[in-house]
Amino acid sequence: MKAVAVFPGPQEVRIVDQESPRLTLPDQVLLRMLDIGICGTDKEICSFEYGTPPPGDDHLVIGHESLAEVVDVGTAVERLRPGDLVVPSVRRPCRHPGCAACRSGHQDYCYTGDFSERGIKDAHGYMAEYVVDREQYMNVVPADLREIAVLAEPLTIAEKALAQIFWMMQQRPPWIDPETARGERGNGLSAVVLGIGPVGLLGAMVLANAGFTTYVYSRELPPSPRIDLVAAIGATYISSQTATFGQLAEQAGNIDLIYEAVGHSHFALEALKVLGTNGIFVLTGVPGLQAFVEADPARLMREMVLQNQVLLGTVNAGPDAFTAALRDLGLFRRHWPAVVPALIAGRYPPEQAADLILGRPTGIKSVIAFDVSR
Ligand SMILES: [Zn+2]
Ligand SMILES: [Zn+2]
């Protein structure tokens, strides 16, 4: 079978021909991969800045955002049958008995750092025709989400963040009542998303859907299909080329939430200066090596203390976030029928994977499909 792999030694990205995997344990499932999304993490891996092959291997099969069809199940598999659609999660627990996070099924909070991640760190990924994995890591997808479920994994970033924020907002201003419906928890509050790539756009959808008055702030200037998507979900786009952070804050009022989805340290620091009273700042971007910037940490610290601000870093994601992502994809499609499918730029054969990954990101999701006719 075909797979797309990086070889860190000779620094190559190419298609490999490997033996198809087989079931070897009773709780395993055999998956035929349908869609594999590509993102900035794949770009870093294919630029040899990130990513580690499994121990003893000279290559890493990439791909972590995926949708698959179950084609065979082991004798102990209970929840899944051939024909079911699934989105596999990415991170697998470390082996340390003392890691409370991994031992309780929350490897996204792993303490030791010895977790593995399929397609990223110490484990092969999903950009292959067939994959074997364990039932417990599969998230079942309703059949009617076939066309868009590949977006579930990138959507888990915002879902996990929002779950944490709502929990916090029950304990601190604006003291959201736990009984408040999900779609009303952001009512009367303003949220700013930094960045207009897929993570930013999906984050904006989650926030708008939760009732926040949502702004997206990024470099891009109109006309742009990404800016059109922001408008289509009822959010407001503001370009950093035409409005300063100060002007953004004037328009948004007290900024209750900033959702950072760029991975640019200077931009994030500037944004922190306009976070409102009792505001929460969520960091999701993972910056590579960047130029040092001048900062005034004393001022930042003073403002954060005097305004009861929260700075939260979050990495995706556990089973609850996948469940929420799949539920919300269905909701988003009902609210904005034209928008969600438009997030997928197109499906391309694996031969084009390297060019798409290393090319200029469109901000809308490109998907690799082994059978583009499906
Ligand atoms: Zn990704
Ligand atoms: Zn762990």
Image (cartoon, helix red, strand yellow):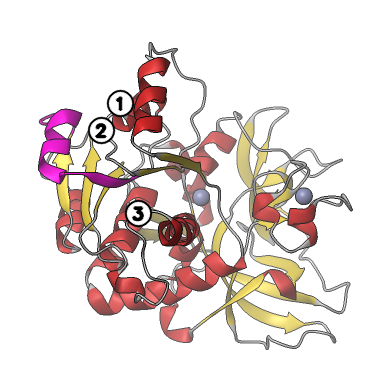
**How far apart in space, not on screen, are marks 3 and 1 (Cα)?**
24 Å
**How far apart in space, not on screen, are marks 2 and 1 (Cα)?**
7 Å
Name the amino acid, label 2: Val
Query: Where does label 2 land, which residue?
Result: 274
The answer to whether marks 2 and 1 mark residues whose Cβ atoms lie closer than 8 Å is: yes
Q: Tag 1's secondary structure? A: helix
Q: Quadrant of residue 214?
A: bottom left
Judge left or right: residue 223 versus residue 219: left
Name the amino acid, label 3: Pro
Query: Where does label 1 land, which residue?
Result: 270
Residue at 20% x, 37% y: name it.
Answer: 220
Q: Looking at the image, tell me whether mark 2 or mark 3 is earlier in sequence order.
A: 3
**How far apart in space, not on screen, are marks 2 and 3 (Cα)?**
18 Å
Q: Which residues are magenta?
A: 240-260
Image coordinates of residue 191 in percent, x first then y, are 27, 50
Other-residue count near label 3 (Cα within 10 Å), few / some / many at <14 / 14–19 / ≥20: few
Image coordinates of residue 106 in percent, x first then y, are 69, 59
Q: Tag 2's secondary structure? A: loop
